[in-house]
Image (cartoon, rainbow, N blue to C red):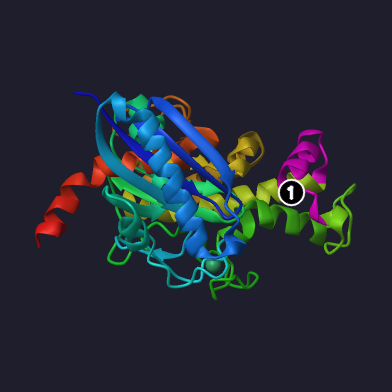
Amino acid sequence: MEKFAIGVDLGGSNLRIGAYTSSGEALASVAFPTDAGSGYGPVIDKMCEAIRALHAETSGYGKFAGIGVGSPGPLSLPDGVLHNPPNLPGWDGVQLRREMSNRLAWPVWVDSDANVAALAECRLGAAAEYDIDSLCMITLGTGVGGGIVLEGRLWHGMNGGAGEVGHGPLILDGPKCNCGARGCLELYASATAIVRRAHELKLDGVPHDANDACANAFTAADVAQLAAQGNPVARQIYDEAGFALGLGIANLINTLNLPLFTIGGGVSAAWDLFSPRMFATIEEFSYVYGMSRPAQVDIFEAGKTHICRARLGPDAGLLGAAMLPWQTARHHALSSAG
Ligand SMILES: [Zn+2]
């Protein structure tokens, strides 16, 4: 009998819900604004109502495996308890998994948005293409997120803190980060960081007052466009991002020795601008990469360290959320029994 699951991509601005088969085929989906300001209760009510409607629409497809949710962090796992999430103000302490289980008759799994994107890349993206089942994914968006999949399963660590690659401190005298540390990867390779550097370096064509509305509309993609046109300051900004990413990935390669490191999120579209410095830095700082470098970086070889762009684009979070019931089914059965 065919199986399907429902995934939820709970974003600070938009909420997307989709029903997918176990092989990632889309059955139906719905999207609406999160309206996080209305408080977590009404948002979760509306989300669960939409899940019930989608289930009713797709239930003829086959056996229903349950619901997976990708949520902004920080959150502790596996209970999905939110800790002052910057993208969901007022949701501190919300027990997302329990709130949803109380409203729905089906099993619910919660994970971080970066982790579910990594799971999707593993099951349906680059790792699937290379027929491997372990990877580390780095997501370059407003912040820098990460997820680690080992032999087909997300590695959460003890409390769900594993894979926080965006807050690996890299530059000792770097700027202060929201996480309390200094010089984190997120401060160099996120979209936010690229726009901040454009203001700091007074990039031509960029409004210099970071507080005016026009300045705020300036994006990392605008910097990428200027860099592609040859603007030296814009190129420097992406070169710096490549250096920081290279240091971060060198640490990850030396720690994890995985076959695949994949880079997704909006900033990854500027791959051609940041990847030359990224690869050069990895070569310089990771002796493990030196031992396992493929003959050509864009051709996969078994037993080598491969670093590439993510394959799935903006749907990775939704798809990965819908994959959660498949990968955690066994773990859930064990922990429920205990
Ligand atoms: Zn940090």
Figure check: 315 above or below 11: above
Q: Residues within 10 Å of mark 1 (few under 14, many from 20)?
A: some
SS assignment for the magenta stretch, majority: helix
Looking at the image, residue 333 sits to the left or right of residue 243; the answer is left
Residue holding disc 1: 236
Figure check: 167 above or below 144: below
Question: Which residue is more in the foreground, 142 or 50?
Answer: 50
Looking at the image, residue 36 sits to the left or right of residue 225; the answer is left
* Quadrant of residue 158 within the rendered picture: bottom left
The quadrant of the picture occupied by the N terminus is top left
Whole-percent x and y of residue 322? 36, 39
Residue pictured at 64% horizontal, 34% vertical: 272
* Quadrant of residue 177 within the rendered picture: bottom right
Amino acid marked by disc 1: Gln
Q: How many marks?
A: 1
Whole-percent x and y of residue 260? 38, 39
Instruction: Indicate yes or no: mark 1 CB to ligand 1 under 8 Å.
Output: no
Residue 287: tell me if it is visible: no
Question: Which residue is more in the foreground, 296 or 210?
Answer: 210
State the SS at label 1: helix
Whole-percent x and y of residue 134? 30, 41
Q: Which residues are magenta?
A: 216-232
Figure check: 274 above or below 109: above
Question: Which residue is more in the foreground, 205 or 246?
Answer: 205
Considering every residue shown, the one lying at the far bottom of the view is: 180
The quadrant of the picture occupied by the C terminus is bottom left
Location of ligand 1 given as a quarter of the image: bottom right
Residue 76: tell me if it is visible: yes
Looking at the image, residue 295 sits to the left or right of residue 38; the answer is left
Residue pictured at 43% horizontal, 72% vertical: 93
Whole-percent x and y of residue 92? 48, 72
